[in-house]
Amino acid sequence: MDSMYADFADISLGNMKSIGYTGITKPSLLLAYQQLLTLSFRIPKLNPPLSPRVPRLIEKKHVSIARVQYSIACRTFSTNSVESSLKNPSTTHLARRQGASSSLYSRPSLLEMKNERIANRVRVYEFLKGLGIVPDELDGVELPVMVEVMRERVDFLHNLGLTSEDINNYPLVLGCSVKKNMIPVLDYLGKLGVRKSTFNNFLQRYPQVLHASVVVDLVPVVKYLQGMDIKPNDVPRVLERYPEVLGFKLEGTMSTSVAYLVGIGVARREIGGVLTRYPEILGMRVGRVIKPFVEYLESLGIPRLAVARLIEKKPHILGFVLEDQVKPNVDTLLEFGVRGASLPSMIAQYPELIGIELKTKLCSQQSFLNSSIGVGLEDFCRIIEKMPQVVSLIQSFIVNHLDFLKYCGFSLLQVRNMVVRCPQVLALNIDIMKLNFDYYQKEMCGNLDDMVNFPAFFTYSLESTIRPRHQMVANKVLKCSLGWLLNCSDEKFEEQMNYDSFDIEEIEMETQFDMNTLLEPREEESSSEYEEDSDDEYI
């Protein structure tokens, strides 16, 4: 034991302060307290004597004591430094100031941050102005801090086909992030089938779509359209034609307009086709647009159910502005000499009549027919009452038909009378007219005067009507006028042929448009394929 502590006492402490330790009777635990001046050790008496394992424990304590000495020495050095700094407070204050000025975590003041934001926005605004974009409306809009990020947005929009002028029309589009807003929206539209070639027009009409959430805003509208029996393949065409529909609320205008149309008689199964061909209906207010339009047509003498059938066939007529187009055109027709009683049938035959630039067309066509075949104003009004589409016929198309009739041998006066009695001869397929005329001359041995009295002969099918009826009359060795032969239904003709006696010269009145044809229930299903209605099928 004595030699062990002697070895411990010989440990060199170098220049460090002398440290004394007092051992504790438990061999496995050592507690120490600091004595600054003396080095002394007390050797505890151990009972019973040390076992053979004690030397190993003592050897471990040598290492532990050395470590404690090194730790105490370090603390002593640190303590001296602290004491030195306390004695020189000015030195400590300077060190703190120097440390604060060189810190990597120093934060600018709120004023500095505000000034920096203003400077960044000024740089972004100058960049936009250099591209011809006016940033006046962007105050308060969150924009990129860096010019490079803004350049990325502008370049992306330009690549979509939008010009600086388009951006000026809706500058808030610059607040949309390319990655967070634009790309997700455009990807979704592309997956639906919206053609990339239409993105330019799509975004020009409805740039607000770039602010939309795909899940929250776009998906519900698409599901609603599909619920209206619009086929998935037709949905992208609907969106291309009327992108504004993506901004409507489901429980608002869209649902009320559809409900009103069904209420006036539009067949539920036809709604999908109606909306596909003219989706603008979804944005029309019932009280301000649809209902006044329907009621005005009713006031002219068109039954409500007939109006519903017209909407099924040509839904775009709902886009005619009542006060600016419809009513002025009706007034023009009346002023021109059209009889009020003829208006319902004229509109039912050619609904576009109330939506086109009518006055100019009327004057132009009347002047042309007058110079070509001597049609006066009164006769012209009778012509358009029977066939209102005449106002939109291309004049070169009319000339071809007039030349054909002259080629057949009709005089100018006869041609005029034929056109007044049956204006359809100005719009029929000339090849079919030629086949009918050849059969009339060669097989029926008819004279031109009879055809002048019944020019509607050209409107009948040769194979399904003219030839079969002529053969039946020929078998009975009868001779009759063209009007008696053709101007009746198949059932009526067979009934006439079964009479024991009948007036061969009986001629029924020329057929006029029958409004009841619009009131008959439709048996065929509406085609759901996307087809754009031409605003004017005769132009």
Image: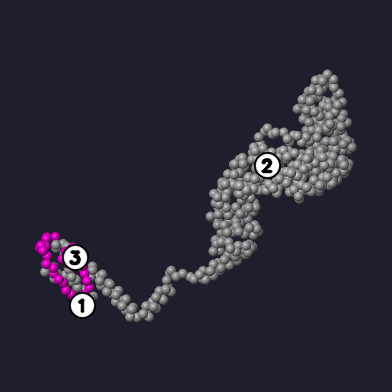
Q: Secondary structure at mark 1?
A: loop
- Asked whether the beta carbons under mark 1 and mark 2 sit within 8 Å of each other, the answer is no
The amino acid beneath tag 3 is: Lys
Give the number of the disc on residue 261: 2
Q: Which residue is mark 3?
A: 61
The amino acid beneath tag 1 is: Leu
Pointer 2: residues within 10 angstroms few (<14), some, or many (20+)? many
The magenta span reads 24-53
Q: Which residue is mark 1?
A: 37
Looking at the image, is mark 1 or mark 2 earlier in the sequence?
1
Q: Position of residue 512 (x, y in %)?
A: 80, 35
User: Which residue is depicted at the point 59% across and 41% down?
Assistant: 227
- Asked whether the beta carbons under mark 2 and mark 3 sit within 8 Å of each other, the answer is no
Q: Main secondary structure of the magenta part?
A: loop
Of tags 3 and 1, the one toward the viewer is: 1
Looking at the image, is mark 3 or mark 1 earlier in the sequence?
1
Asked if residue 28 lies in the magenta stretch, the reply is: yes
Q: CA distance from mark 3 to mark 1?
A: 23 Å
Of tags 1 and 2, the one toward the viewer is: 2
Q: Position of residue 240 (x, y in %)?
A: 63, 47
Image coloring type = one colour
